[in-house]
């Protein structure tokens, strides 16, 4: 236990940093954005929730993000084509984000429901030192608030640290950190997870087989995430990592602290991304100034991405060189990753981002996707997992939270369409999720139970 | 069957999925409000009084039905505005999804959510030890629940179509018919466990609603015959 906690402690640090990086996705280039604003204005008023509007923004933002160096003419030409394509892609992008979020939640809920390990309370992380086993309600509340404050301050410190590192171009350091944390996540957590699952289903497995399986899983994961790999494999790895991280959170965060932390993090996300002095915003602006993509921390991309290296020299496969990022770690702490659609990402391996200008031409044919920070995945899954673990109304509550989060995601994407800049993905979804969780658990459950008892249908 | 409907008709088109999830959300919101009302009334009343509790439950159910229909109406309004937006955004001046399709998807969304909420705890308990209904309740509990849920999901789908059609063409009697039907179905479940009283009328109503919706959507006996005989 202790070693585990220590490990997770050290892991949290990279996560913090990483996620903070993540969230800072570069907003669309101003020039491009201006051009888009005019065209968007017409659409904006026609928007309703979860409509194609959302589709527009990702596309637009994707275009905008690519590079502002240079090709304004080409940009305007592409712009028109882009708009026509946005409608087609819009809803598709929302779905492209729905599917992985749903998958992640399903994995987490399935694990929670079946493997008892993750619902046993076996200690707490060092970041939440106050215990919740206190006799009085007030004391418990106080403890959870203190836990939250500590956790949030840790995250803020990490984020600021990361921004400073980025500002002073310590790319190697950041890379090394990312690699280290993803290494730990892929190997250690997977080992523990597999161990628990095997225990639950009473399947015997010898150590050599286990070693082989985990080694393969981890090695492929590292390659996929940090280098090149097929898009779907990368996405699958990111989802698995997010799920693992969410499970860790669910296990080690005490109850009330978890809810307060969820609420506080969405507020922090909101502030960090939107306030002018917020660390994430500064990160985004710095990256924009340097005209390089935001450091590839954990971000889930729903479409293929270019790697700068590839775009430059030649051919570069238009296609699927994705990079998976070290999602888990980063995602964990920070996920305040604003949603942002950006089709360009730089290689993690090559720290110095090269101008992505050449890839710009190829952008028009590439399918743009929306990017969502892994931290968002993790916190959504934490919410749903907690609902599954602790709600006495069981599946109804879980289902309600699930739908609420998806709707929140839709709304956020819609806002992305309207505002066309990096937005925090957490607040709306988490708010909906929390509201629905508490209300379903306390209000709907007795109602449905009584109805089911009498077999009445509404 | 409802899941089959989903897979074959909705899953491939992302816009429909969004409409579906939104429909489910609206149903959920209506459920939330109605349970809030019920909860308040229960808390405010005497918990020992059995007939009163039953009466409150009935009131809760009816109120919930009305709220569901109200939310369906709100959803219709939202979808209308969305269609206008979609038309404005699309390049060739016509919306990629018609209001009828939306009506269908919205109905399925409502139905799926309602079915899920009714069934899922039951299913989860069914996986466990077989202790449901051990106190002398009807042996047909699971079976009837399954059928009832299915009929309700289908009914929601058809009501969605009818309701939206009524709103489109301003046929108030269609809307009232939907509401009355919904109330009737819910009311018939009060006869449970006398299953004759609830399942049979529900199925009859569903058949009626199905034919009505089919006719409204432009089908006819000829179309049906052609489809069944696999003519082009």
Image: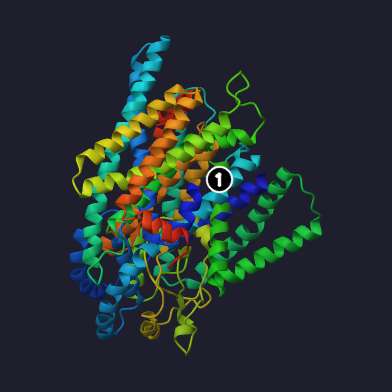
Tell me: residue A411, above or below residue B86: above
Q: Which quadrant of the figure has residue A360?
A: bottom left
**Residue with the mark numbered 1:** A109
Q: Chain of mark 1?
A: A
Name the spot of residue B74 as percent of width and height, x first. 25, 43
Instruction: Classify residue B107 as left or right of residue B231.
Output: left
Name the spot of residue B94 as percent of width and height, x first. 24, 66
How is the rendered protein coloured? rainbow
Determine whether the residue tagged by mark 1 lies in a helix, strand or loop: helix
Name the spot of residue A184 as percent of width and height, x first. 62, 59
Name the spot of residue A170 as percent of width and height, x first. 47, 71
Which is nearer the eye, B62 or A153? B62
Which is nearer the eye, B227 or B110? B227
Residue at 42 percent across and 82 percent down: it is A354
Instruction: Classify residue B74 as left or right of residue A354.
Output: left
Residue at 21 percent across and 72 percent down: it is A34
The quadrant the C terminus of chain B occupies is bottom left
Residue at 26 percent across and 48 percent down: it is B165
Disc 1 residue crowd, few under 14, some 14–19, many 20+, Cα 10 Å: many
């Amino acid at each position: 236990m202790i070693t585990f906690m220590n490990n997770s402690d050290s892991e949290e640090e990279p996560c913090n940093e990483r996620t903070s990086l993540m969230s800072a996705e570069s907003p669309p280039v101003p020039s491009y954005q201006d051009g888009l604003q005019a065209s968007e204005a017409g659409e904006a008023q026609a928007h309703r929730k979860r409509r194609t509007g959302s589709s527009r923004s990702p596309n637009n933002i994707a275009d905008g993000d690519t590079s502002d160096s240079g090709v304004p003419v080409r940009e305007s030409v592409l712009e028109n084509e882009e708009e026509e394509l946005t409608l087609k892609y819009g809803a598709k992008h929302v779905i492209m984000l729905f599917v992985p979020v749903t998958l992640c939640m399903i994995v987490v809920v399935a694990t929670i429901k079946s493997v008892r390990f993750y619902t046993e309370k076996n200690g707490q992380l060092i970041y939440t030192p106050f215990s919740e086993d206190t006799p009085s309600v007030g004391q418990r509340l106080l403890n959870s608030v203190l836990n939250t404050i500590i956790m949030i301050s840790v995250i803020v410190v990490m984020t600021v640290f990361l921004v400073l590192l980025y500002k002073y171009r310590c790319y190697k350091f950041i890379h090394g950190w990312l690699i280290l944390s993803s290494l730990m996540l892929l190997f250690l957590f997977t080992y523990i997870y597999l161990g628990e699952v095997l225990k639950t289903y009473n399947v015997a497995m010898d150590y050599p087989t286990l070693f082989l399986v985990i080694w393969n899983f981890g090695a492929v994961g590292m390659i996929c995430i940090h280098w090149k790999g097929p898009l779907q494999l990368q996405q699958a790895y990111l989802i698995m990592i997010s799920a693992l991280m969410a499970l860790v959170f669910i296990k080690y965060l005490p109850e009330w602290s978890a809810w307060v932390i969820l609420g506080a993090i969405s507020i922090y996300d909101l502030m960090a991304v939107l306030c002018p002095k917020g660390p994430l915003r500064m990160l985004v602006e710095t990256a924009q100034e340097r005209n390089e993509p935001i450091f590839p921390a954990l971000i889930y991309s729903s479409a293929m991405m270019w790697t700068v290296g590839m775009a430059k020299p030649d051919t570069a496969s238009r296609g699927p060189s994705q990079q998976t990022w070290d999602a888990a770690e980063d995602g964990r702490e920070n996920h305040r990753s604003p949603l942002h659609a950006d089709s360009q990402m730089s290689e993690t391996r090559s720290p110095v981002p090269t101008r992505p200008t050449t890839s710009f031409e190829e952008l028009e044919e590439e399918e743009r996707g929306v990017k969502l920070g892994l931290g968002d995945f993790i916190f959504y899954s934490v919410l749903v997992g907690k609902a599954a673990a602790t709600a006495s109304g069981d599946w109804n509550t879980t289902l309600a939270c699930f739908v609420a989060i998806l709707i929140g995601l839709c709304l956020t994407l819609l806002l992305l369409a309207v505002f066309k800049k990096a937005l925090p993905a957490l607040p709306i979804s988490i708010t909906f999720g929390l509201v629905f969780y508490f209300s379903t658990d306390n209000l709907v459950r007795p109602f449905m139970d009584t109805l089911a008892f009498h077999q009445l249908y509404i | 069957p409802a899941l089959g409907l989903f897979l074959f008709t909705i899953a491939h088109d992302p816009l429909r999925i969004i409409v579906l999830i939104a429909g489910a959300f609206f149903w959920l919101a209506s459920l939330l409000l109605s349970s809030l009302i019920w909860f308040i009334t229960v808390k405010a009343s005497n918990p020992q009084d059995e007939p009163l509790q039953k009466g409150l439950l009935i009131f809760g159910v009816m109120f919930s039905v009305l709220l569901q229909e109200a939310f369906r109406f709100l959803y219709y309004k939202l979808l209308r505005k969305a269609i206008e937006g979609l038309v404005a955004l699309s390049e060739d001046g016509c919306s990629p999804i018609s209001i009828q399709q939306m009506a269908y998807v919205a109905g399925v969304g409502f139905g799926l959510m309602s079915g899920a909420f009714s069934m899922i705890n039951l299913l989860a308990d069914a996986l466990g030890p077989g202790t449901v209904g051990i106190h002398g309740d009807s042996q047909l509990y699971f079976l009837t629940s399954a059928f009832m849920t299915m009929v309700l999901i289908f009914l929601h789908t058809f009501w969605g179509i009818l309701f939206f059609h009524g709103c489109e063409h301003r046929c108030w009697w269609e809307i009232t018919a939907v509401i009355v039907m919904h109330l009737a179905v819910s009311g018939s479940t009060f006869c449970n466990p006398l299953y004759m009283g609830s399942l049979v009328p529900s199925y009859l109503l569903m058949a009626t609603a199905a034919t009505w919706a089919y006719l409204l959507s432009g089908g006819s006996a000829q179309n049906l015959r052609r489809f069944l005989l696999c003519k082009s």
